[in-house]
Image (cartoon, coloured by chain):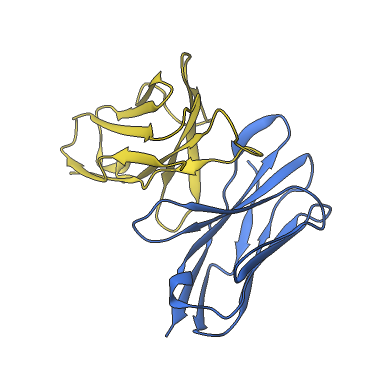
Chain colours: A yellow, B blue
Amino acid sequence: GAVVSQHPSRVICKSGTSVKIECRSLDFQATTMFWYRQFPKQSLMLMATSNEGSKATYEQGVEKDKFLINHASLTLSTLTVTSAHPEDSSFYICSARADTGAEFYEQYFGPGTRLTVT
Amino acid sequence: ILNVEQSPQSLHVQEGDSTNFTCSFPSSNFYALHWYRWETAKSPEALFVMTLNGDEKKKGRISATLNTKEGYSYLYIKGSQPEDSATYLCAPGYFGNEKLTFGTGTRLTIIP
């Protein structure tokens, strides 16, 4: 149980285009999901907390107009990188917290998406 | 910004040997500490969650301890096997804040 999928796993796009990444909880409902970004040799940096039915909460320094988050249902959150530039190239990973049974803020992770902007 | 440190950053261990590594974190307002194992090309997998000072959790050959007063946790692996090769992440959570803050991880490589 507690499986989170993420799609696509890899994407290459041209500078100036937008890219959408999907995060799905497959066997549980998740009102709250999280989006992280990992820079080389660094930790997972929280970008935003995604809440079903309300606006996402962005961390300081993360541009909300650049990284659009939509939590359309209890099992799906999407992250859209708008007008992507090479500096947006990174590894993006999502996690979800189960609405029931989650202990002490436990999060279940997707496998991540490697974004390369050319 | 919370400072969560893990050491060492990387570690090479001979198969069969035991090893341990450290996570240190701010102790004020502490709620819970999570350990995750992250294998290449897979999702990070939850190993343990600990909340009480002196907690010790065990899963097979892997165990962890927690000191909430001084803000550190140790992860131990006994009799390392190749399948233990992974990055081990710790993440404390704090009261009143649903977020977890991740350390940079310890990258463990088991040498056959």
Q: Is residue B29 above or below residue B26?
A: above
The structure residue drawn at horizontal position 15% and vertical position 37%, both measured from the top left corner, is A14
Tell me: A35 left or right of B30.
Answer: left
Q: Is residue A76 above or below residue B9?
A: above
Residue B18 falls in image quadrant: bottom right
In x, y percent, where is residue A110?
39, 43
Residue ranking furthest to the top: A53
- Which quadrant holds residue B71? bottom right
Which residue appears at 59% of the width and 44% of the height? B101
User: Which residue in the rendered view is the most extreme toward the left?
Assistant: A14
* Closest to the observer, B5 or A60: B5
Q: x, y (%) of residue B44?
A: 46, 52
Q: Residue at x 36, y 48 (%)?
A: A111
Residue A94, compared with residue A49, is above or below; it is: below
Q: Which picture quadrant has residue B22?
A: bottom right
Count of labels in the image: 0
Which is nearer the eye, B97 or B65?
A: B65
The C terminus of chain A is located in which quarter? top left
Picture residue at 46% right of the left edge, 43% below the top: A1
- Residue B46: percent from left, percent from top: 54, 51
- Is B98 or A58 nearer to us in this picture? B98
Q: Is residue B74 left or right of residue A91?
A: right
Question: Residue B64, percent across and down?
Answer: 68, 63
Residue A118 in the figure: left or right of residue A96: left
